[in-house]
Amino acid sequence: MAIPDRGSVEYPEFFATERTALLTLLGGLESADWQRDTPCPGWSVLGLACHLIGDDMGILARSRDGYFGTAPPPGLVGDGFARWLDDLQAQWVQATRRISPRLVVDLLGWTGPQVVAHYQAQDPTARTAAVSWAGEGVVPVWLDQARELTEFWIHRQQLVEAVGADPALDPETTGAVLDALRWAYPYRLGAVGAPGDTVVIENQLEKSDHDHLGKLVTYVAALEAKAAIWIVSQPRPEHVGAITWLNESQAAGFYLVQVEAIRIGDSPAAPLLTLITGPSAEAKQVGAEKQERAERHDLREAFWAGLLERAADKTRLHSAVRPNKDSWLSAGSGRSGVHFTYLIRRNDTGAYLQLEGSNQAQNHAVFDQLAAEHDQIEGEFGGSLKWDKVETRKRCAIGVDIVGGGYASDPDSWPAIQDQMIDAMARLEAVFKPMVAGLPKMHEN
């Protein structure tokens, strides 16, 4: 659904109405009311009111003055942007905790008219704004104004709830807010499916439970659906977590939507749908990374199994070792803290003698003792070795990196890669095994 150039109402006039209602509410509070908790976790009435001051100043600084003192990091979108914004807002509320209730009311009375005047001066049809919940591209300015109105209106309702005041739902302002919010749905639900795709909708209309979650997943699997929407009146935290986890998969998109009834004046009750959690690029990336990690572990284990099988005829050094999912495979040398270790990465491998006792000074001393025989050791090995010691690191290593392939290589090439590793390890064993026997006892890591 395309966003029109002009909205259904003139939003600047509703800012003035909304600000009057806010100042009336705050101006009538008792001292104890300012410390009451609000539906915004961790924020008191005073804290939430200070947040609104920050919203006013942010609008004026960014939109009117063109000053972006706290621009988000480049490329930050979706859930990552939301987390960054949450942290920024929490820092503001923390910084304004010394502002008194009277100052809060005065400041909101001072900034509010400036916001209204700025919005009245804007061209509402200009497509120069960005509203993340309505789309990724630019949108008309009126929708940015509408987005800001919805935030002020919702926060005022949260303040009303916290102090038990009359919500004072002006039908025209509330209608303008709901009309603005509806523009979130074409974008948010646009990825649910393409024409012809199967979408499962589970209308529970009560507190979420395990039974309906099970049904939702079963229907998605049985019907090979591309997306699933679960509508509940009260989402339980464990089910929010379950839907978030499901969205890390690549199979389907899962949406958890809260439904509430809302009435404007004397009108019939109407449903208000709120997206609690749904698919995101970040969730898919997390899922892809987990899948890649699992595949990487399986490849390593298969590679190590093949290496150990091929090595059995040439050296018994690792005969007591079983394949694992790690990037290394170690065997003892007969001396504690000293190991013969194979290494594997995506595109290369290695074979090393590792000095990894618990005493850094002792590891370095043994390394230096062996390094004193550098030329003799490399001569007996038959080539150059990598002598790896970092003064700030406990572990030391002597060995060789082998280029030409790793666990991500075609499995048909693994035998040749494994033979190179086994040959290098056999030569390391021949050189170092006699020398290790004469080393001082080391503390095991």
Image (cartoon, helix red, strand yellow):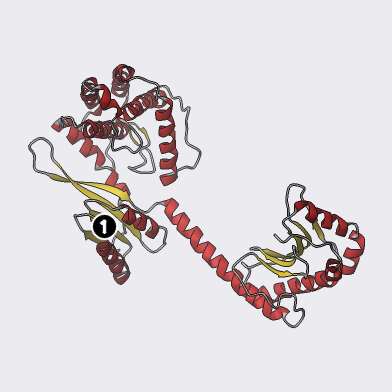
Point out residue 427 in the picture as x, y percentages from the top left corner.
Answer: 82, 72
Where, quadrant-wise, is the C terminus in this rendering? bottom right
- 261 versus 305 height, above or below: above
Residue under pointer 1: 230
Residue sitting nearer the eye, 334 or 267: 334
x 20%, y 58%: residue: 204
Closer-to-camera residue (163/199): 163
Q: Which residue sits at x=27%, y=52%?
A: 235
Q: Where does the image place residue 83, in percent across and percent down from the top left?
A: 43, 42
Query: How far across and how far down the image is residue 44, in percent?
Result: 32, 31
The residue carrying pointer 1 sits among few (fewer than 14), some (14 to 19) or many (20 or more) residues within 10 Å by Cα, namely many
Q: Is residue 8 visible?
A: no
- Residue at image position (47%, 55%) is 285
Apparent side of residue 102 relative to residue 289 in the rendered image (left or right)? left
Q: Amino acid at mark 1?
A: Trp
Q: Residue 148: name its quadrant.
A: top left
Query: Could you say where residue 382 lies in the image, as x and y percent from the top left?
Result: 87, 68
22 or 67, which lies in front?
22
SS class of the residue under badge 1? strand
The reply to whether residue 250 is visible in this rendering is: yes
